Amino acid sequence: MLTVLSFLLAIGIIAMVHEIGHFVVARRKGVGVKEFAIGFGPKVFGVTRGGTEYNLRLFPIAGFVDLKGMDPEEELESEDEAFRSKSPMARAAVLVAGALMNIVLAILVWWTVYYLQGAPAPMKPVIGLVKSGGVAEQAGLRSGDRVLAINGQSVESYYDLLKTVSISPGIELDFKVVSTLPSVPAIGDSTSSMASETAGSAANAAVNAIAARNVKITPVPDPKANGAGHIQVELITQPPIVGRVIDGRPASKAGFKTDDRIVTVTGQPVSSWSRMSELIGRHAGQEIEVGVMRRENGIDSFRTLLVTPEASGETIEATDDQGKLIKYRRGLVGITNQLAASTQRVSIGIVGALKASLKKTWNTCGQVLDGLYLIFTFKMPGGLKNASGPVGIARMTGEFAERSFSMFVEWVALLSTYIGLFNLIPFPALDGGRLVFIFLEVVRGRKLKSGIEETVHTVGLLLLLGMLVVVTYFDISKWVSNM
């Protein structure tokens, strides 16, 4: 129920903000608005002011704005307030306003969150796991290396690294890296204290910060990601720290606790959540040893827990140590991760929060546009199978809402950015598609023949609906397989 309600609330807010943008600019440009509605379905309540009906409809989800003269065939008593009678610039402003309001919403949300809770500490591109025998290991890349630059271009985040590598299969890249890892304390066989970082390890880290080195790596195509480049490493983007233990599941019975840091699985060290999940996932129905570091009374101690992962409905294909293809049912123990971005925040004040929100929105716009480009040019790794439709977005919305209110509203900001920019794609039926026809009108000096634009938009809408059906099918398939 939480998933459904949080999804409807998120989409409702985003859509209403979008429509408010169209409404406000339309009125300022002299375009008549027949109806401004909150929700869909039968009208529940309404008033008329200034020639516009303001209605509340039965299903208060999202809303819409009905502009006069939007339909070229619509008959009006006067063309003074018709959308079609306005200048190209005025019509373009009305169309763009919705997306701009979505961007403004994102800025305001992130500004508020960053001011009240602080900005998240940046997730640096630090290598966690280097695949044995892979191209990265052969080139000399090591666990704990922080990527500073690729081909002379600064790498500020793990996204910068992944983006560059994914588009460069078969192309040699010059990595500038520096080791970030101090000496790691040994872990005993049973409960033992873990010393804090020593002055010697801090000195080692300082030396490493100076000793940057260059390694040349040629990304190899990843067949599981539609040929996108990868260097056979895993980034430390999420540490293996337990955020929540689900009652009644194997982890709860085994004695896992919130804030446990998982350090070994079946004796193999792990430094990231994904690596930990992979190792646990290979042992469905088998009792395994999981080593955790737990802080009690200010002291970190190592414990070995015995847990038997449950078999899920998902079948995994992988290679064993000899390179042979193996298949297995993924094992789950019933824990969720503790998101680093939600636990490591820095107070930066109201002005700093504004700057951080603008930077976050700018970077998010770039990431969204990159993703949309890959989708519409059929270059997205995994194709539409890796895209998320309404079902996938609803599930993620529910997960964020369950974790915390701040994570939910930040997710709303991200969705708002995505939906706003998606609407500006120059594709028929979208606001961006209508902008293309306005541009053609300016270039030609006259509008296209009546009916052509609406026909193109109808075809575009059918294509979008078809893509939505396909993505929803993959969403549901992934959901069922993980049950």
Image: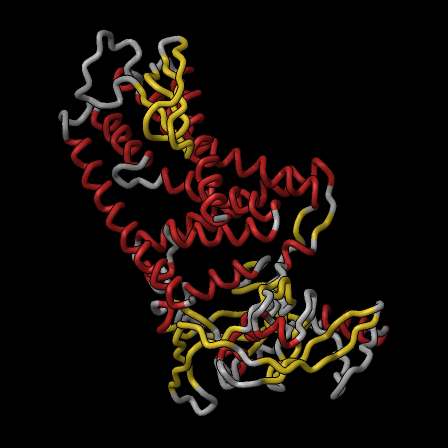
Return the residue nearer the eye: 335 or 23: 335
Residue 365 drawn above or below residue 130:
above
Residue 236 drawn above or below residue 393:
below
Which residue occupies the extreme bottom position in the image?
322
On the image, the x and y values in percent for residue 279 come to 53, 79
Q: From the viewer's perspective, is 296 left or right of 1?
A: right
On the image, the x and y values in percent for residue 415 come to 47, 44
Return the residue nearer the eye: 385 or 4: 4
Question: At 15% across and 31% down in the image, what residue appears?
Answer: 452
Q: Do we see residue 247 in this rendering?
A: yes
Question: At 70% across and 46% down in the image, what residue appears?
Answer: 118
Residue 142 drawn above or below residue 14:
below
Q: From the viewer's perspective, is 101 left or right of 466?
A: right
Q: The C terminus is located in which quarter?
A: bottom left
On the image, the x and y values in percent for residue 308 come to 55, 81
Which residue occupies the extreme front position in the image?
248
How has the structure been colored for display? Answer: secondary structure
